Amino acid sequence: MATTRRVAPFAEFGRQDVGLVGGKNASLGEMTAHLAAAGVRVPPGFAVTADAYGELLDGHGLRARIEEQIARLYDGAALDEVGAGIRSMIMAEPLPAGLRTEIVSAYEQLARDQGREDPEVAVRSSATAEDLPQASFAGQQETYLNVRGPAELLLSCHRCYASLFTDRAIDYRERMGFDHLAVALSVGVQVMVRSDLAGAGVIFTLDPESGFPEVIVVSAAWGLGETVVSGQVDPDEYTVFKPSLKDPVLDPVIDIRIGAKRKKAVYGEHGRTRSVDTTGEERSRCVLTNTEVRQLAEWSMTVEAHYGCPMDLEWAKDGLTGELSIVQARPETVQSRRRTTTLRRCRLTDIPQKSLVEGIAVGEAIGSGPVVVLDSPVDLDRFPTDGVLVTGITDPDWEPVMKQASAIVTDHGGRTSHAAIVSRELGVPTVVGTGQATKVLRNGQNATVSCAEGARGRVYAGLLAYEERETDLTDLPATRTRVMLNLADPSAAFRWWRLPADGVGLARLEFIVAHQVKAHPMALLHPERLDRRNRCAIEQLTEGHLDRGQYFIDRLAHGVARIAASRWPDPVVVRTSDFKTNEYARLLGGQAFEPVEANPMIGWRGASRYYSDGYREGFALECRALRRVRDEMGLTNVIVMIPFCRTLEEADRVLDVMAEQGLRRSEHGLKVYVMAEIPSNIILAEEFARRFDGFSIGSNDLTQLTLGVDRDSETLAHVFDETDPAVTQSIRLLVLRAHSADRAVGLCGQRPSDDPAFTEFLVRTGIDSISVAPDSFASVKQHVAAAEREPRADEPVGSVQGSGRTA
């Protein structure tokens, strides 16, 4: 189209028109013109072009006067003084008459198309250097919602032009190296979606913290979307697994986290918006159904495929029609720019005390310094360069201070809040949604902010020591022996997706039960056996769940699914619960169902529980959760592993119980492994191999039971040795016997991480896999490669052959 037009509908623009209508409007035009046929719904609207902005600047020498103000900035004038001066000049300059006429005419046409008089519209700034792959400019200029009538529309457009020179926008362009007058502004005018009567939120087509590309993360809150972006609320979060999304039969929603959602933005009585409290029912209820999440995720994949890069989108649901819409789309600019071949990790080297506050971790770094509690931005010379910024929420006005902070902590906000988005771009460790940081943390106290411990960010007292390490993953050698990961925390699973691991050799259900379910499964099923205090605690924990057994299944399935998705399609070995009775008793409601044992380590644990009357119903919930992950979510890379299986009869009884719950060996490709941690597993390896598809050596328990040493005994610590000949001979025998039955053998334990010689021993036995903690992966991989370069004792020099078994 000709670039002399001041106003035109979205459909007449595309992403090639960023210079004319800015990134935001170009994307709206691109989706309107090219993705409507694919079902992506975008509310209609029009753009006021950058040419119109240029016309305003060229009138009465405004451009020259702005240049003079910018020159003052470089001469040392205060940023706030320069910004205020430019904004005043822009607002004092009337919009050209022709421009006013065209804007009003386009608005009236929009009203006719909608069949409404003076429809509410959103008026959004769209800079010509905005939403680029290398810089987002997100939130730098103003947006005005619930704008009605020609007069309000013209005023809002004028204010958008002035917002190109807010202090935060000037600072951002300075930091990103953009010429202030080379960046022009277009204005987008879009019909409002009545999300004030429903909900809205943000979508990333990758995990925004780790960059894991196989998921879509949808956040949602009640009301208009500004509460999510600004960080005023802690939204719901839904994680969608892309490979399962491609199959209409599968449920691709692998995780749901319900946020507090204490506020929502709604229409004000005289235009614009206001914030109100949500109801208790709204806080406990999901904003979106699984069907709606799937619809948004499918649209997001369509947009991502069309643009050819990860995307950051905003969505809204109309409370009158029930329709979903995509209202904005921009390239994701943080994770997509990271080097995928380099793994940077931080780790506390001091042992911290109990955290002062906790929230959602943004990034994976650590920062420390004196706490600075603020309720509004301050001049940079009043903020220490190593200060820990603590505040309620942030908006773009905070960005100069955020840039100078060593870490940031907020009371409110989720992973898509302003604080989270900007801190990722700045690389500043940030903990959002703590709820109480401004009340707990004191000005001047030293604090360490850690985002290196999974999804939970923690603030500790004092300046704790920590280390930073970078691993070039391209330097890691290929190995014949599979090197896998031990994972327990589902919230941290996506952090390790870049590691070239061969899967997960051990995922522990007990961690998920303890940290995400938080209750004994039998207590959920039989609250009548609990005292009043525990019954009340169970009711509070499972609020909103009519079926408490389903609560257990949902939480467990979501935890397992995140781990399985992080390594898809490589095998993920999930061990069913292996709490000891004293550990089960510590779960909420657990004491009513657990006996007191003199030696729980060799008591009622593992397989013996699964067929017994005291836990059979609890194990059935575990099986139903695992079946949901495999059959309903499509994560068929999950292998089930049975721990502490003492006898062949016990193995048969457990497999029968599993079959009753729909988990049958070989059906739908299901493999079932057994832990090899009891001498009977070694002695009867051939018989166990007929019942199970593989073995995983639990070296701690195997050493304990072979040498007769309590592994927790300090007195006998000098006797406990996994390299004792009795233990190593057992490992050799198991590998030999398992391989003769064509069964794979792995080992999951700490010793290979600590002892290269033990790793070499395992490789020389011909073991199929070694599973280690993620932070040990690189070193163990190198040790394995070194051991494989030396010939095994039982093979001729130059032989490089594997067992041929796969997980």
Image (spheres, rainbow, N blue to C red):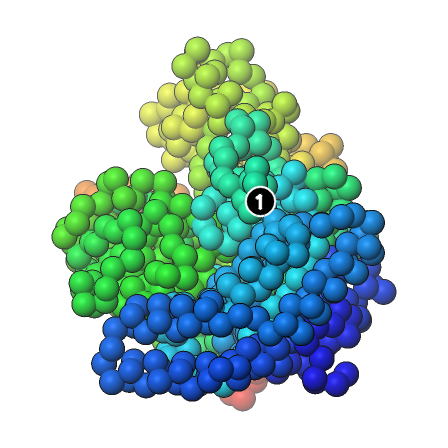
Kind of element beneath mark 1: loop
Quarter-of-image position of residue 273: top right
From this viewpoint, which residue is outermost toward the right? Answer: 37
Is 82 placed above or below 65 here? above
Q: Which of 729 and 150 is in front in this view?
A: 150
Q: Furthest residue to the left?
A: 444
Residue assigned mark 1: 271
Q: Which residue is drawn at 83% across and 56% down?
A: 113
Q: Quadrant of residue 326?
A: bottom right
Estimate the x, y position of residue 227 in percent, counting from the top left. Answer: 51, 47
- Is residue 275 in view? yes
Q: Residue 35, how many percent across, how many down?
A: 79, 67
Q: Nearer the viewer, residue 60 or 694?
A: 60
Look at 25% across and 51% down and name the residue there.
Answer: 374
Quadrant for the C terminus in the image? bottom right
Q: How crowded is mark 1: few (under 14 residues within 10 Å), some or many (20 or more)?
A: few
- Reply above or below: 189 against 357: below
**Left or right, residue 155 beside residue 731:** right
Q: Quadrant of the N terminus?
A: bottom right
Residue at the location (46% across, 17% down)?
A: 536
For badge 1, the amino acid type reads: Gly
Q: Can residue 750 be seen in the rendering of this structure?
A: no
Q: Position of residue 642 (x, y in %)?
A: 57, 43
Location of residue 61 with respect to 748 vertically, above or below = below
